[in-house]
Amino acid sequence: MGQIRLYIAQPLTVGSEVVLNEQQSHYLTHVMKLKVGDTISCFDNQSGEYGCTLIAVGKKQTTLKVLEHHKPYAQTPDIWLLFAPVKKDNTDFIIQKATELGVRKIIPVQTRYTITERIKRERFEAQAIEAAEQCRRVDLPQIAEIKKFDDILQQWDKTRILYYMDETLTGKPIAQALENAKSCAILVGPEGGFSAEELEKLRGLSFARAVCLGPRILRAETAVVSALSCWQALKGDWQ
Amino acid sequence: MGQIRLYIAQPLTVGSEVVLNEQQSHYLTHVMKLKVGDTISCFDNQSGEYGCTLIAVGKKQTTLKVLEHHKPYAQTPDIWLLFAPVKKDNTDFIIQKATELGVRKIIPVQTRYTITERIKRERFEAQAIEAAEQCRRVDLPQIAEIKKFDDILQQWDKTRILYYMDETLTGKPIAQALENAKSCAILVGPEGGFSAEELEKLRGLSFARAVCLGPRILRAETAVVSALSCWQALKGDWQ
């Protein structure tokens, strides 16, 4: 099967035909120069990955036939990411990397220092789809609407431990903090960190744990990749 | 002391005066709008960090006075990064993140699929300085000239274990691979991976160890951040 992978927003079954939307059609035939008979991989975020072949190429429309089921559906491990959107490029980067690193759910959080002007869920979803296609996931991360810091904490399921990256150097080293972790979530604050009130709130919560990522100051997007990588290595599907 | 931090390319001592170059002068007085009497932090990559105050601001020249020594010099842990440069932005990103993550030495490697058109060591050094200023390191990573894959392996000090990120899923999980790690180096291939011959060579070396970063395909820059984060968490100064 070819290296090209597409997410198809409808259920796939062997033998069925799929008419691609204009954007995907353009990508396959004009960008990647595929012809009738070429093969690609597709996944539908519910039944796994399929080998497909192009059976018709038109001006604005391309049709695929689903040939075989070659990978079952599976969800990535039960890890969530909560992050505070900041600059547009960094936010795109965080969505992309969290998807590559196998996060199951992404929740943008409005903290005191979050910049929320440019929060567009459709944009986040497009970034996640592109990253999932590229990294060979067969599922997509769920992307929640942005929520306020206080609301998230009030509605939190207390059985899910919330590890927050604490720049004040008072948290536990991450390898130690994650020792007994199971279902959990990683919370990374914005550039500028959490406010003093936010940190105080976090410190008072039974389900929250302060984590320290070493003596250097990491940018928010670095902290996201670092924390998720450590979790996958110690508790997730990199074991 | 202020939040602004500058690397000064000359030895600092308490009581001495430093005439800044035009670029740093412009940054402090025009970008950051500092005035005589304002304070910043400076480090010289050999004796630590100092609190300094602006004592003269001219059109093209700014003078600092070194007031106090407030942090001793220390090198980051003994971890090296070998990476294969690819696209310009990703390469910049790798230098920046490796610096934030406390790498002591960075060696660009020319592998079969490396794109070497844009390798400029001065550019790498500028990226590393900026990241070191921001993340509060008091040392700079050493940046080597680009070397050929074969030459690096032939001249390698065999007591330093070389962990290479192996996309063929045959390596050890990273947490397990790093169990007995001490002085070591992380090698990440380019987009497109190592060639078959390169992988075969690596597999035959007594000092090289294949590492697997999970079932998803990571981009080169993600693999760099992931591997360095795991090393710092398990063996470095995040413990």
Image (cartoon, coloured by chain):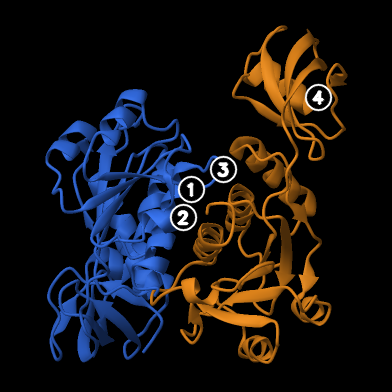
Chain colours: A orange, B blue
Measured along the vertical axis of the image, is residue B94 above or below residue B78? above
Alpha-carbon distance for marks 2 and 3? Answer: 14 Å
Q: Are marks 2 and 1 on the same chain?
A: yes
Residue A220 sits in which quadrant? bottom right
Q: Is residue A112 left or right of residue B58?
A: right
- Pair 2/3: label in front: 3
Query: Which is more N-terminal, label 3 or label 2?
Result: 3
Closer to the observer: label 2 or label 1?
1
Which residue corresponds to the image point at 71% horizontal and 55% vertical from the top-left? A104
**How busy is the neighbourhood of tag 4: few (under 14 within 10 Å), some, or many (20 plus)?**
few
To the question of a shared chain for discs 3 and 1, the answer is yes
Please state, as top left, top right, bottom left or bottom right, where the C terminus of chain B lies in the image: bottom left
Three-letter amino acid code at the position of disc 4: Glu
Q: Which mark is residue B213?
A: 1
> Which numbered mark, 1 or 4, is in the foreground of this view?
1
Q: Nearer the viewer, mark 2 or mark 4?
A: 2
Residue B215: numbered disc:
3
Residue identified by numbered label 4:
A22
SS for tag 4?
A: helix
* Image position, residue B179 (x, y; %): 36, 61
